[in-house]
Image: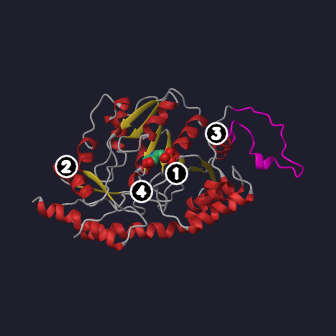
Amino acid sequence: MNIRETPIFVLRPYGDEKEVDAIREVIESGWWGNGPKVQEFEEKFAEMVGVKHAIAVTSNSHGQDLIIKALGMKGVDIINPTISFVTTAVVPMWNECTSNIVDVLPDSMCIDPADVVKYKKSNSELLIAVNQAGIPAPIDEIRKIFGGFIIEDCAHSCYTEGAGTKGDVAVWSFQAVKTMPMGDGGMITLNDKDLYEKMVEMIWFGIPPTWKRFTGSGYAWDYEIETLGYKYYMIDIMAAIGLTQMKRLPDLINRRQYIQKIYNKNLHREIKRPMWSDVCQFYSCKVNPDLRNKLIKYLSDKKIHTSVHYKPLHLHSILKQNRDYPVADVEWKKSITLPCHYGMTDEEIEYVIYWVNSFFDNHR
Ligand SMILES: Cc1ncc(COP(=O)(O)O)c(C=O)c1O
């Protein structure tokens, strides 16, 4: 097969005139900031997840920060999995909490309840469970052995049926290459009214939203600030993209599921298939660790981009922990993420399969 001239990206957002029209409408409305589009997005998102409240934020990372601050957690221990994006380990540190990084399960690469039991401390008050690659984390099991507050990190699971309903609160991401991308942005979803109201107050320096202070003769300027707040709210330009992407979501997911099925069926037998993911944020399969980096280079030479999700967090110098990680340390070296996104054509899917299989045929 001839080598392509243009690369196949490992992840990529998809949008067209519909997103452009949605942004144009907001631009022309003259209301670009936090306003009615954000409110509509929050309402529709809460309905999709099946919870009472949603708060749109600048990112999942800021969402997690807002939750920890609203809970008033400072100086406590926060448990999080080593296979994750750096957010889940570092946001606790923003809040002067210890980041207690634990091991994962070998198949799902989600947080391991047995390791939580082994390493939880007397001051472990919060746990962040990541639905890795869209595969649900074992939160029901964790509930049995951990009595603290649970954040369900749904950055990869938008939208897996049932996601966002197991933790005490869920946080989503619409960063540029997520399953429902908006460039950037996040959402917090929950049922707890008091925590919701506290976060709404903190999202903009404790100031009530401008557009809700409109009286007909102008905006009421006299407000009282009683809370230490931040600037984490979403704006209407972003929410317009989010509402449009939300309409596309069934198509976006169908295509990812299709690619996952075709890969599972046709990739070389030496490749260990990942557990099924409804959204397949990453098609992260496993290969012989001695061949993994050679395969990455081989595919790169064929213009196929790949990635690794993730190098364990405890291997980063700032996040080092005084313990071993028998599962993550072995499993991550096998892991490789192949291209999987809505815009991939059938020819591109075949092209990836062809070159992956040819690599293994030549390395036996
Ligand atoms: C598991 C996980 N949590 C949190 C984040 C952070 O999301 P955001 O970029 O919206 O802050 C990411 C982003 O990649 C992620 O993968």
From the image, state whether disc 1 or disc 2 is nearer to you.
2
State the residue lying farthest toward the bottom: 346
Question: Overall secondary structure of the magenta stretch?
Answer: loop
Give how far across and how far down residue 140 sits, in percent.
44, 50
Q: Name the residue that disc number 1 marks.
A: 172
Tags 1 and 3 touching, CB below 8 Å: no
Spatial CA span between label 3 and label 2: 44 Å
Q: Is mark 3 within 8 Å of ligand 1?
A: no
Q: Is residue 163 visible?
A: yes
Question: In the image, what residue type sits under mark 4?
Answer: Gly
The alpha-carbon separation of the residues under discs 3 and 4 comes to: 29 Å
For mark 3, what is the residue?
231
**Mark sitting earlier along the chain (1/2):** 1
Mark 4 → mark 2, Cα distance in angstroms? 23 Å
Answer whether residue 354 is magenta in the image.
no
Residue 206 among magenta residues: yes
Residue beneath the point at 51% across and 57% down? 181
Q: Earlier in the sequence, mark 4 or mark 1?
A: 4
Bin the neighbour count of mark 3 within 10 Å (Cα to Cα): few under 14, some 14-19, many 20 and up: some
Position above or below: 214 against 348: above
Quarter occupied by residue 261 = bottom left
Mark 4 crowd level (few <14, some 14–19, many ≥20, 10 Å Cα): many
Q: Nearer the viewer, mark 4 or mark 2?
A: 2
- Whether residue 125 is visible, yes or no, is no
Residue bearing the label numbered 4: 134
Mark 1 CB lies closer than 8 A to ligand 1: no
**Which region shows up in magenta?**
201-227
- Judge left or right: residue 7 versus residue 140: left
> Can you tell which mark lies on residue 289?
2
Q: Given this view, does label 3 or label 4 mark the residue nearer the observer?
A: 3
